[in-house]
Amino acid sequence: MGSVKVTACCRQLFLPYARALALTTKMASGNIICCLRRNLSSSSRLRSSMPAWVIDEYGNNGVLRFTEEATAPSVNSASEVLIQVHAASLNPLDISMRGGYGSNLLKLRRDPVSLGQNGSEFPIILGRDVSGVVVDCGSGVTHFKPGDEVWAAIPPWKQGSLAEMVNLTEYEVSHKPRSLSHMEAVSIPYVAATALSALVNAGGLCRNNCANKRVLITGASGGVGTFSIQLLKAWGAHVTVTCSHNAEGLVRGLGADEVVDYTAGDVAAELGLLEKFDVILDNVGGDSEQWALGMLKSWSGAKYVTLVTPFLLNIDSMGLLEGAVHSGLNLHQKAITNMCKGVFYRWGFYAPDGPALDEVSQLVDAGKILPVVEAMFPFSQVPQAFQKLEGGHARGKTVVTVAQEEEGTRVTEEEGEVETSDTPEQVREEVREAVPKR
Ligand SMILES: NC(=O)C1=CN([C@@H]2O[C@H](COP(=O)(O)OP(=O)(O)OC[C@H]3O[C@@H](n4cnc5c(N)ncnc54)[C@H](OP(=O)(O)O)[C@@H]3O)[C@@H](O)[C@H]2O)C=CC1
C-alpha cells in the first residue's frame, strides 16, 4: 500500500474526525517561536544545543517552555542511534508525567549524564513517540545507518521527542513503514509497544494462536484501542469493544466485530449477553475491573490484562520500597483471588521493543494496520496539543510536526492550519461535510 492510498483511505475512514482536527488546529494561532524546518547538516549535528519544549518543574500546561538552548544529545556509546525528529506524538502518559507522575522511579532510571548539577531531572523533554531520520550511529550499531527513516517508542526515563533530536539504543528503534509519512507513522510506536506487551507478554496472544480467540477491548476508541483492534484482526481474533456511541463508526471501520456503547446503559449487562472472552484488554480501569473479570471463560487459561495500574502512583505516594511492596502485594492478592475463580489477572505495561515494531511495520506496509491520526499540531503549538489531549475523548492520536514538511501534508506556521495534498478548498469542503448538520 502506497502512502497516497493510506492517506486517502484514512481520510475516508476518519472524515468524522476532521472536525476535531479543524477546531484544534485553529487554536491560539501564531503566538510563539519558529517552526523547525531545516535539514540537519553535519555542522548542526555537532551543535551542543537544540530547540525543544521542556519542563523545569511539574505542573499544568503552564510549565511547558520552549527553548532554543536545550542540551543536544550525541552518540555516547556503541549501541546508540541519534535521530533527527520529524514528528512526535502525545500519549496520556505525557500529561501525567508533566504533573510528576512516576517521577520517583523514573528519576532512578534516568541517565546520570542527563541529570542536572544537584541531581535534578530537569529540564525534562516529554514526547514518547518519534518518527525521524538517523543522523549518527555508535560503532556497534549494525541495523541502522545515517539517512535511514526510523520510528520508535521512547522509554519514559529518556528525554523525549518534543525536540530536534533524540538519542536511543539500537534495540529501541525500528525502520519506519515505507507506506506512511512521518506524521502518520508517529501515531503508532508507543501504543503499539504497549499493546504488544499487554496482549503478547501478559495476554499470551500471538499471530499464530488468535484464530479462535474472543477478545474484549475496553476504551477501544483511544490510541491503544484503535491499534489493538487492528492488530488482533490482522492476527485473526474475534474482537468486541466498548466505546462511546460516536466512536462506533471508527472502531467498526478498523475491524471491530461487535461494539457495545458504554454510554447507552448497563455495559456489563450488555456484554453479559455475549459469549465469554479468552482475553480482555482493559484500557479504562476503575469500575470496569469489577465486572470485566466475570466476562472471561473460566478454567480455560483466560486472561484479564489492565493497563490502568496503581504501580507508579504507589511509588510516587509511598516511596520506592513501600510503593513497590504494596503494589506487589496488591497484584498478588488479585491474581490469587482470580486464579481461584479460574481466570488470570495481569497488569500490562509499555515495554520498549524495536524488533516488535519491525513486525508492526510489515503489517502497516501490508495495509493491515492504518494510522489513526485525530489531530495534528505544528511544533509551535505543543501546549495546544497538550490541551487537546487533556480534553479527553481521544479518537486515535494527537501528533506534532517537529521538522521537515511532509510530502502531501503541510502545517502552516502562521495559522496552525493543516493542509494536505488536496487544495485548501477541498480540505475545507471535507471539514464542512464532516460537521453534523443542525
Ligand atoms: N500501563 C502502561 O504502561 C500504559 C498505560 N496506558 C493507559 O491505558 C489507558 C488507555 O491509553 P490510550 O488508549 O492511550 O488513552 P486515550 O486517552 O487515547 O483513549 C482512552 C479512550 O477511552 C474512552 N473511554 C473513556 N471512558 C470509557 C469507558 N468507561 N468505557 C469505554 N471507553 C471509554 C475515551 O473516549 P470517550 O471518553 O469519548 O468514551 C478514549 O477514546 C490510559 O489510561 C493510559 O494511561 C497507556 C499506555 C501504557
Image (cartoon, grey):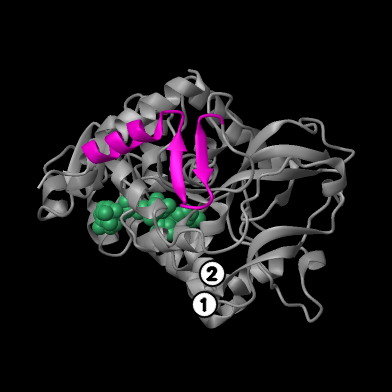
Q: Secondary structure at mark 2?
A: helix
Confirm whether the magenta stretch covers residue 418.
yes
Q: Earlier in the sequence, mark 2 or mark 1?
A: 1
Q: Which mark is residue 59?
A: 1
Q: Which mark is residue 148?
A: none
**Residue underneath mark 2:** 98
Picture quarter containing residue 130? top right
Nearer-the-camera pick, 258 or 272: 258
Tell me if I can see residue 240 in this picture.
no
Left or right: 376 as drawn, with respect to 103 = left
Nearer-the-camera pick, 235 or 382: 382
Nearer-the-camera pick, 10 or 158: 10
Q: Position of residue 314 (x, y in %)?
A: 49, 75
Left or right: 183 as drawn, with respect to 225 = right
Q: Position of residue 69 (x, y in %)?
A: 75, 65
Picture quarter containing residue 134? top right
Boundaries of the magenta span: 407-433
Q: Amino acid at mark 2?
A: Arg
Q: Residues under labels 2 and 1: Cα distance?
A: 6 Å
Left or right: 264 as drawn, with respect to 49 = left
Q: Position of residue 136 (x, y in %)?
A: 82, 40
Q: Amino acid at mark 1?
A: Gly
Q: Residues within 10 Å of mark 1 (few under 14, many from 20)?
A: some
Left or right: 161 as drawn, with respect to 101 = right
Which residue is pictured at 57% across the width and 34% down the height? 406
